[in-house]
Image (cartoon, coloured by chain):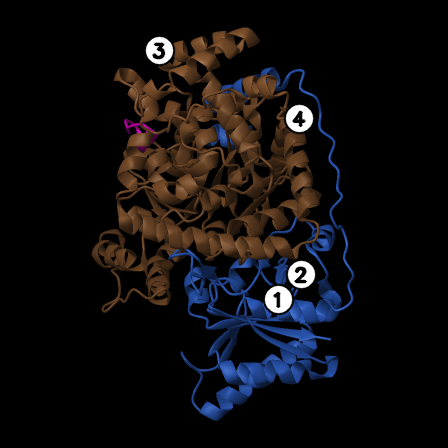
Amino acid sequence: MSGGNTFLGMPAFPRNAAAAVQDSQLRFNLRKATHTIRGKRASVVAELPDWTELRAAGKEIKDHTLRNLERYLLQMEEAVTAAGGHVHWAADAEEANRIVADLVKATGETSVVKVKSMATQEIGLNEALQAEGITAYETDLAELIVQLGDDWPSHILVPAIHRNRSEIREIFHDKMADWGRAAPEGLTDEPRDLADAARLHLRERFLSTKVAVSGANFMIAETGTLVVLESEGNGRMCLTLPETLISVVGIEKLLPSWRDLEVFLQLLPRSSTGERMNPYTSTWTGAVEGQEFHLVLLDNGRTQVLADEVGRQALRCIRCSACLNVCPVYERAGGHAYGSVYPGPIGAILTPQLRGMGSALDASLPYASTLCGACFEACPVAIDIPEVLVHLRGKARHPRTERLGMRAAGWVFNRPARLARAQRLGGRLRRFVPERLPGPLSAWTDTRDIPDIPAESFRDWWNRTDGGAR
Amino acid sequence: MSGTAAERAPRAGVSASGRERILSRIRAAVAGAPDVEITRAYRTSSDPAGAVELFAERVADYRAVVHVVEAGEVAGAIAATLDRRAPARLVVPDGLPEEWARAVRSAVEARAADAGAEPGPGAAAIVRDEPVLSAAELDAADGVITGCALGIAETGTIVLDAGPGQGRRALTLVPDYHLCVVRADQIVAGVPEAVGRLDPARPLTWISGPSATSDIELNRVEGVHGPRTLEVVIVR
């Protein structure tokens, strides 16, 4: 089942990626999907004459919020409480899961419907609820595909992006009956038919389930308002019909004022699904329409990210997934290779900061990039992902041979005279430089070509010819 | 931490200390960091000229059905639309303008009379949310007619705020057909104008076209859990 814990013990990124690129079906699915969405995003972004200014404002609003996070969180807590909601604070995943499980148990219910939420995936909420005898039903179409297929999400926005229509039909046909209403007879692989099957499968569940769990895209400190953007209406079903609503929201999702939505409701839909606006956005403040409302504020490593002066910009992320869709590495390796619910470029900087770089997988993530910068350009809140990748590479532990090599290079580059001597030596010995280095050094040359060494360095040529004049 | 939550959650003490831990970590993390000024150089208002036409075009882009009518034609347009769609059980929220409500009543009564049958399941009827409809009763309805709080031209968005003539949020969600009437004076040019006009204390639903998904190969398919058909009458 989808969740944070299932990724434990995965090998490092290079091995996962090497396996993934052998899967031609996966590469075909990903290429088709990412190229479709790239085109859509580019055209709706080009429509807005003030995109650059919106992007700058989005970045500044987030940075200002993060700088004043304590004040705005307290303001949020006060506003939600004043509007009849209850606020809980969870320092880590375990605390958050405990709080949600206890809240569900207090209602006497044994099942919940869920709106797609990255935060609850990150903390492995579904598995934690299962252990307490509570079944969590995913209701977003892609999450449903992942849940029924006993699979992992591979994209922030479209978790089942690695599946094509015929695979989805297969999953619905085989698995829907195990979770509720079976797939209709004669189900085809037409997207229209598959969407209808999901509608039928979940309808009764929406009408009868009494507790819902959601995340949120934004929360507004000034008013205590929560905001959820979605497409299908499953979000509205979960937010509206159940008697109890529990929202688990990362502390970085805060915006200071109601007005700030005018920026983010333009940035997010265009960056994420490539639409002028997503079909449905719901906002609510505290307990509305007779509902009981609980807000669980989640840290789970975010304050640790906040403490890193370079890395903290990752907390500006609004989970649009534009960086995934433009990334040449993601397009080929797919989301599973990143071993986290946050794949792609943003995952490569967020996961190692949230979880630390203790495991081989997490330490390898800052290298899961060519540093081409396409992600930075696409990011609607201007997160300089390459900058953070390089910063994290600097913090990761490097192999002994690499450290020795770097120290030797540093020694040479530190004095011009040493460098000139080394260059002359290299030029003279250049015929003896092998294409692949021996022993442990081969790890370097496996993925890199040694550049051709010129017979003469530029400086020597300049001095000999007086800048080409002689 | 509110009182009720503390009584309810058996280990509320954990979250109380969680609060202190989180806040002190935040203080330590940002100590000494410079504050950031917010500059709003983006458009905060746009030219409202042509907003009605742009709104009609952008709503239609989402594959909603759009009619633009003159003020005197709204009753006729509602009646014609209901005749064509023929929803048997139509939910009508309180506070719908009397002219629209009258058009709805006569359209539904005319259809019931045409059928000539006794009122019963399947017969054309108006359904009111008074007493409050259960989810199952709402699911048995075929359509809903509402007004709205405002429309946004640039994005083709309709915003409902559960005000008069709109009803609570579930009314426009569960029935499969939503007919929404938008007055020209409710249409603003862009998102900033809309945010400025709306009241965050009210539950808001922003609707841009019918329910849709892009989860299968990133192809947009209309109609998943929300209304599969959205029809919009714009009144000049």
User: Closer to us: mark 1 or mark 4?
Assistant: 1
Subunit ID for the residue under disc 2: B
- Which residue carries the number 2 mark? B154
Please identify the dominant SS of the magenta region. Answer: loop
**Mark 1–mark 3 contact, CB under 8 Å?**
no
The residues tagged by marks 2 and 1 sit, at their Cα atoms, a distance apart of: 7 Å
Q: Is residue A251 visible?
A: no
Which of the marked residues, 4 or 3, is nearer the chain's N terminus? 4
- Which residue carries the number 3 mark? A400
- Residue A19, image quadrant: top left
Would residue B121 be found to the left or right of residue A262 on screen? left
Please state which amino acid type lies under the numbered disc 3. Arg
**Mark 2–mark 1 contact, CB under 8 Å?**
yes
Subunit ID for the residue under disc 3: A
Q: At x 49% / y 92%, what residue is drawn?
A: B114
Chain A: give its colour: brown
Which quadrant is home to the N terminus of chain A?
top left
Q: At x 59% / y 39%, what residue is drawn?
A: A219
Q: Secondary structure at mark 4?
A: loop
Which of the marked residues, 2 or 1, is nearer the chain's N terminus? 1
In the rendered image, the vertical position of residue A450 relative to residue A32, given as above or below: above
Subunit ID for the residue under disc 1: B
**Neighbourhood count class around disc 4 (C-alpha, 10 Å): few under 14, some 14–19, many 20 upward:** some
Residue B168 drawn at (x, y percent) = 57, 59
The residues tagged by marks 2 and 3 sit, at their Cα atoms, a distance apart of: 58 Å
Question: What stretch of residues is rendered in magenta?
Answer: A7-13
The residues tagged by marks 1 and 3 sit, at their Cα atoms, a distance apart of: 60 Å
- Which residue carries the number 4 mark? A68
- Which residue carries the number 1 mark? B58
Say which chain is blue.
B
Name the one closer to the observer, B198 or A427: A427
Please state which amino acid type lies under the numbered disc 4. Asn
